[in-house]
Amino acid sequence: MSRKNIRKMMRSGTQACPICSREVPLVEHHINGRGVPHWNDPWNIVSICATCHDMVHMNKLSNRIIIEGWFKTTSGRELLWHHAGEESITGEESEPPVY
């Protein structure tokens, strides 16, 4: 992780990760990468913990997290995600670049 990202993470304070619910500093993740129009808008960004962020970018398929995106529900905006190998709720699986 770069120094710039570590500084950003520490400025955010601790919050609950929307995936694992741990109260830790969060990092920004672009759901559909940066190759889409308006890539830096809120619909394409989620703040998740560093552990979950690493699991999104894993090369191994087992335990990899796939983020489908933000969706409006009766209880507000909710992040939909699943582990690789599980069925997609929406059928719209984002594929971020794997580093």
Image (cartoon, rainbow, N blue to C red):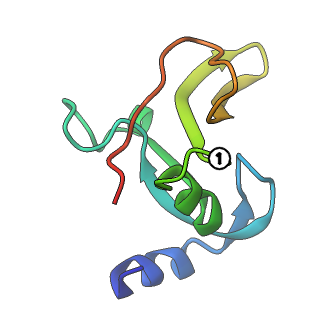
Residue 17, quarter of picture? bottom right
- Which residue lies at the image location 77% right of the left edge and 53% below the top edge? 20
Residue 96, quarter of picture? top left
**Count the marks: how many?**
1
**Vertical placement of 89 versus 80: above or below?**
above
Neighbours of disc 1 within 10 Å: few (<14), some (14-19), many (20+): few
Residue 61 lies, in percent from the top left, at 56, 44
Residue 63 versus residue 76: which sits nearer the camera?
63
Residue 82, quarter of picture? top right
Residue 84 lies, in percent from the top left, at 62, 35
Residue 87 lies, in percent from the top left, at 67, 18
- Which residue lies at the image location 55% right of the left edge and 81% below the top edge? 10
Q: Amino acid at mark 1?
A: Ser
The quadrant of the image that shows the N terminus is bottom left
**Vertical placement of 65 versus 88: above or below?**
below
Of helix, strand and loop, which one carries label 1?
Answer: loop
The quadrant of the image that shows the C terminus is bottom left
- Which residue lies at the image location 35% right of the left edge and 35% below the top edge? 32
Residue 41 lies, in percent from the top left, at 33, 38
**Vertical placement of 3 versus 26: above or below?**
below
Q: Which residue is mark 1?
A: 62
- Which residue lies at the image location 31% right of the left edge and 42% below the top edge? 33
Task: Looking at this view, name the residue that lies furthest to the bottom.
Answer: 3
Residue 68 versus residue 87: which sits nearer the camera?
87
